[in-house]
Amino acid sequence: MKIGILLFENMTALDAVGPYEVLARIGNAQIYFIGVEKKVYKDFYGLKLLADYSIDEIKALDILLIPGGYGIDILFTNSTLINWLKQIDKTTKFTVSVCSGALLLAEAGLLDGKRCTTHWRRKEQLKKHKVLIEEERYVHDGKIITSAGVSAGIDMALYLVSLIEGEQSAKLIQLGIEYDPMPPFDCGSPKKASKELMEQYNKKLPSTFK
């Protein structure tokens, strides 16, 4: 099973690495880290990830995964990448995104008329497209699966494994990575965060994410 994960400058590392840790455990998985160019890309904080393949080298995939991050907006005007996404999507069994990666799928027209989700701070931006946004951790519509912010990519990936190899396999992977979240604070969504915390968060956001 050929699984491609797109890399780009200023991505959110966990968007790519979280699902990678899950999907790499599929029995016959072949993971391809792909960039517009074959090179090292840095996440927003400087972590380096290597794209072993350029988009020119990848003609078909079983699964395409688009992470999000502050750098996603710059990709919207990259016609070469957008055209590649459209062509690759024709070959996939599943096309999935994490966080603001959904916006790139929307720019390519792959979410038109679809139910979907993204990071809570990006939903107003996503509403500008022909989509149906749902308040869920991940949303499955046809062969498209979109997930909410960052850590939700792990949930999405486990669900994806259940579709491919069955629930038992997904459960074994969840056990193996000891994915049993017990966060010390209950403020992981706008519905749970205090007004003061929300205001503080918004002040710290990079301008591209406001």
Image (cartoon, rainbow, N blue to C red):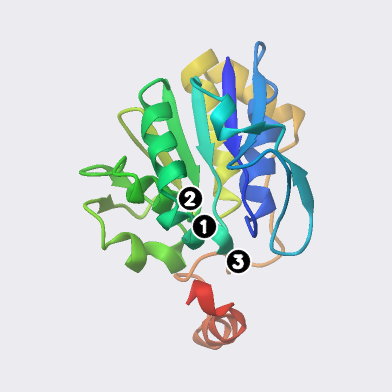
Would you say the residues marked 1 and 2 are in contact, meaning their CB atoms lie under 8 Å apart?
Answer: yes
**Residue on which disc 2 sits:** 101
Dot 3 or dot 1, earlier in sequence: 1
Q: Mark 1 vs mark 2: give the one in front.
A: 1
Q: Mark 3 vs mark 2: give the one in front.
A: 2
Would you say the residues marked 3 and 2 are in contact, meaning their CB atoms lie under 8 Å apart?
Answer: no
Is residue 193 shown to the viewer in this render? no
Q: Position of residue 64 (x, y in %)?
A: 50, 31
Q: Say left or right for 67 vs 178.
A: left
Which one is in front, 170 or 54?
Answer: 54
Q: Report, in whole angstroms, how far the alpha carbon at label 1 lies from the one at label 2.
A: 7 Å
Q: Report, in whole angstroms, how far the alpha carbon at label 3 lies from the one at label 2.
A: 25 Å
**Residue on which disc 3 sits:** 186
Q: Residues within 10 Å of mark 1 (few under 14, many from 20)?
A: many
Would you say the residues marked 3 and 1 are in contact, meaning their CB atoms lie under 8 Å apart?
Answer: no
**Residue on which disc 1 sits:** 72
